Image (tube, grey):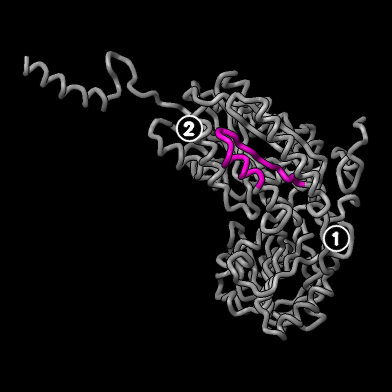
Amino acid sequence: MKSILHAALLLIPMLLLTGTVQGQDVEKKYRVAVIRYQHETCTFCPGGDTDVEDWTRIRPLLKGDDVLNAGSYIRGFVAQALDYGDIELRGITSPYTVFGGSSRSWNTEASFDHFMGLILADLRAQMPLDGVFLALHGAMAVRNIPRPEAEIARRVREVVGPDVPIVGTFDLHGNEDEEFLRWADGAFVTKRFPHYDAALQGARAARYLRRIMRGYYKPTTATRKPPVITPTVLQWTGQSPSMDIMERARRWENRTTDAFVSVFYGYPWSDVPDVGTTIHVMTNNDQALADRIADDMADFVWRVREDFASGNYPMPDDAVAQTRQAIADGATPVVLGDYSDRPGDATWILRQLIEQGVGGVLYAALRDERALDALAARNAQPGDPFDMEVGGFTGPQAGEPVRITGTVRFFGPRWGYERVAAIEFEDGNMLILTPAYEQITTLAPLRFGGIDPDAYDVFVVKSRVHFRRGFDETGYAKTILVVDAPGPWVGTTRLDALDYQHAPLNRLYPFGDPTVEEK
């Protein structure tokens, strides 16, 4: 008898290791698909529609395990999911990113259908699945598809069926309404801008999805759209009332069991019908609670609307005059955030720096693919002379080209581009040229080609808020100036100057009357 008992005791660990007892799973393994499809679309930007080639120019399609390392949202989701030990992840064929990023215009319907066809084919091949994670942005704009992220969820839902939970992560600049949550079970949105918490939101999405798969959470949602639209420069969560809105969402989550509260600030450069502020709330089978939280958040946004939707910034001539004074006072480094330049080739600040004789400037970066092509045509090398006009070619919002005479200090591949140039000119200034809009957020990318960013007194970046990550919130820069442009163009706070065809600007504060009924 003892020998039989001893043998049984030895057998139990072996059965647990193999995962079977009389043919039954000891612990269920959950198969979860991971999909990435992200674009922040500036529909007002010049350059033509974004097509398939634009999505595959930087990097070919992501497949398999490469998908599982594609960005902070996914890495946060994957790390949390793998910690559980009972989730098997399946990376689904996905596009990586668009050449030119958020300076690119409408996605074509053909490109959307092309990539969704690839995604859904791979998804079908991976069935059966227990869950789906969508790493989205929220501000994609596609010709003839008013709500692309909701359409992504709808098409995925058609494949996986009604019982497989779908959860997405989003940038707080997303333009959403209730349609996404009609097809999906949850949305997790960054609460910080700059987006320090992208990986955190991915991890939260993994925990949420697993609870649904295990039957511990029944998603019940509420959506509200307070009629407020704000330019992105005003959405920095390091200042009130933006920080207060996000803190209110966190407090609801911290004091209320099983409540998740997300706030989309919106992306006004996308001419889409769901532009503007949105509140998403998820609760565990408690509709009354979801509605109460959503109502409170929407009411709060409306109460702080005046400060949330207004801001004044110096024009380039005034900003450069203030820069000169900061240099004289020893309040350097100075960072000038060229907040209004969506295409990336505006020269307003560059011209003023030259005219007012400011030296020690690192200008990172100015878009000019024409200048780069000219350098390539003559096989330019470091040390070669440089003498040509740069920038100012995408229309009135970019100003006029500026002539730069100097020396090539770097010319070659950088930042995922085939060609980037660094041109030294005048009084110790350095101008970096890129073939597309490039937003510099930290010092690290600037340490190349012999460039020492610490040697400069002034930085010019094409950025509204993200640059604060490396230059402001680290304490690096002593003077921060967000700089306006002399005209009501795309990128500025003067949204009412844009020719919206789909967005209901006439019903959004501060440019319209929220009481106007939709026609």
Q: Residues within 10 Å of mark 1 (few under 14, many from 20)?
A: many
Residue 242 seen in render: yes
Label at residue 218: none
Which residue, as the protein is rendered here, is positioned at the far front?
255
The residue where tag 1 is placed is 397
**Residue 361 screen position, x and y as percent:** 69, 77
Indicate whether 127 appears above or below 247.
above
Query: Residue under circle 2?
Result: 90
Question: Does dot 2 land on a helix, a strand or a loop?
Answer: strand
Question: Which residues fall within the magenta stretch?
Answer: 248-267
Mark 2 and 1 residues: CB-CB less than 8 Å, in contact? no
Quarter of the figure with residue 419:
bottom right
- Which amino acid, mark 2? Arg
- Residue in the foreground of this view, choosing between 437 and 132: 132
Residue 264 drawn in magenta: yes
Count of numbered tags: 2
- Residue 338: x and y in percent read 75, 64
Q: Residue at x 80, y 44 (%)?
A: 302
The disc, 2 or 1, on the residue closer to the chain's N-terminal end is 2
Residue at position x 66%, y 32% in the image: 114
**Where, by quadrant of the figure, is residue 280 drawn?**
top right
